[in-house]
Image (tube, rainbow, N blue to C red):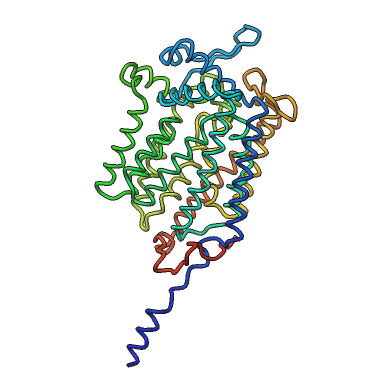
Amino acid sequence: MGQENSHSVMATTPIPVPSRVGLSRGWLGAILIAALLSFVGKVVIASRPFGSLDARLWEANLQELQEAGPAALYEHGTVLRSNGVPYHTEVFNHPPFTIRLLWLGGWLSQHTRMPLRFWLRAACAAADLASMMLILRIVRGTRLYVSPLALLLVAASPISLLISGFHGNTDPIMIAFLLLAAYFVHRKAPLRAGAALGLAASIKIVPLLFTPALALCLPGRKRAVFLAGAIGVFFAGSLPLIIDRPGLIWSHVFGYTPQTGIWGIPRFVAAFGTEMQVQAYAHFAKGVLLLVLSVISVWLNLRRPQPPVVLQCGLLAFVLIWLAPGFGVQYLAWLTPWAWLLSGRQATAFQSIGGLFLTWYYTQGAHLFPWYLANSAATQVWHGPLIFVGLLCWVVIGWLSFVIFRRIADLTELEVTPLCRDTFNLGPSGWTYPAVY
């Protein structure tokens, strides 16, 4: 009789929900409002100033594409002119799929009163909003410590506001597809995860560096399905150039190295060495970075408990930016969606120093505030206090890399096990109690 009563009590009493999981309705509402206001703010900013050098390059890319075609765009690159005099040449280093996006942007500019630079940044704003919705979906299905303040800072990120609203490049779109791939890996949907990764790599090839970690998070045959989906989507999106001009695509897209000597370790090499030594270091560091990210990916998936895929991607993203042999300020967008993995104080430090760094950079590029065109090709930007602020931002990113590494090392089995709605009686909204921050 006593045993029956005890079984009855166990069957009817819900298991307590861990207090570190989920969001209150107040926090959720604040985060959604912040995300929507940020989206509106980015679109408003996108409709007014010209943007950065990248925005100008994309419009020049479109003109070259319309005049000479896709192959010529890769062969000749883009030349910027002032009063008819060339002052800057840029290699077109984007995967062939972006040619289709350029055509679409050109069509939109032709049929509306808004230029390509507006549509590019509006797409980035939409990608940021989609990323925030994906993050909230991931949060619902994890037992990881979640800081509501960190989530709020991602939704209202000054880094995202400046890059998506003003800068004008495809990085936020790329990172949104990478986050989608991580989400589908989290859901154990390999084909959709592979397709999302293929789309991300079709915007920029950087997401390929996350392939080992994403694949190793999946069991057995699902890895093959994931890889087939990624390769298939990337290949299909790159047709016909990937067949007609494979060498051109390989050298310009896969062989490209960003501007070096301005960030992190290369900055120190540039300060104490020659230009030849800077380029030699960049070539060497590129191989070392690939090796380091591969080793980290394997280590993460050999240890037990296996870390959640979002923690793995967060660590890889921060290490990637910290050790990058080349750098562009828009690369900070690669880190913003993973900043919800930090504590409130850590996220505040990252968003603050990143926002300060970008604000200083664009102010020097535009010569004044409010900004209109921050043309770093026509202006010497990297000098004076900006170098110090950039190095401080780099140090903070290195510190946060170590923070995420320690978090993974301290993981318990309880934190890794996904939540189950029925087991934990989450209720109709799916949300639990406020996280500690």
Rendered image quadrant of residue 264: top right
Question: Which quadrant is the C terminus positioned in?
Answer: bottom right
Residue 175 position in % (x across, y down): 48, 38
Q: Residue shown at 51%/33% (left/top)?
A: 171
Q: Quadrant of residue 327?
A: top right
Instruction: Return the residue found at the far left.
Output: 221
Badge count: 0
Residue 62 vertical position relative to residue 172 in the rendered view, above or below: above
Residue 82 sits above or below residue 142 on the image: above
Extreme residue toward the bottom, this view:
1
Horizontal and vertical percent position of residue 434: 57, 63
**Residue in the foreground of this view, choosing between 409 and 419:** 419
Q: Position of residue 320 (x, y in %)?
A: 48, 38
Left/right of residue 387 with respect to residue 177 in the rendered view? right
Seen as rendered, the residue at the extreme top is 84
Of residues 108 and 74, the one nearer the viewer is 108
Residue at 45%, 50% (x, y): give it. 311
Q: Position of residue 64 (x, y in %)?
A: 50, 13
Q: Is residue 294 above or below residue 92?
A: below
| Residue occupying image coordinates x 59% and y 28% | 118
**Picture quadrant where residue 13 is located:** bottom left
| Quadrant in which the N terminus is drawn | bottom left
Image vertical order of residue 241 relative to residue 339, above or below? above
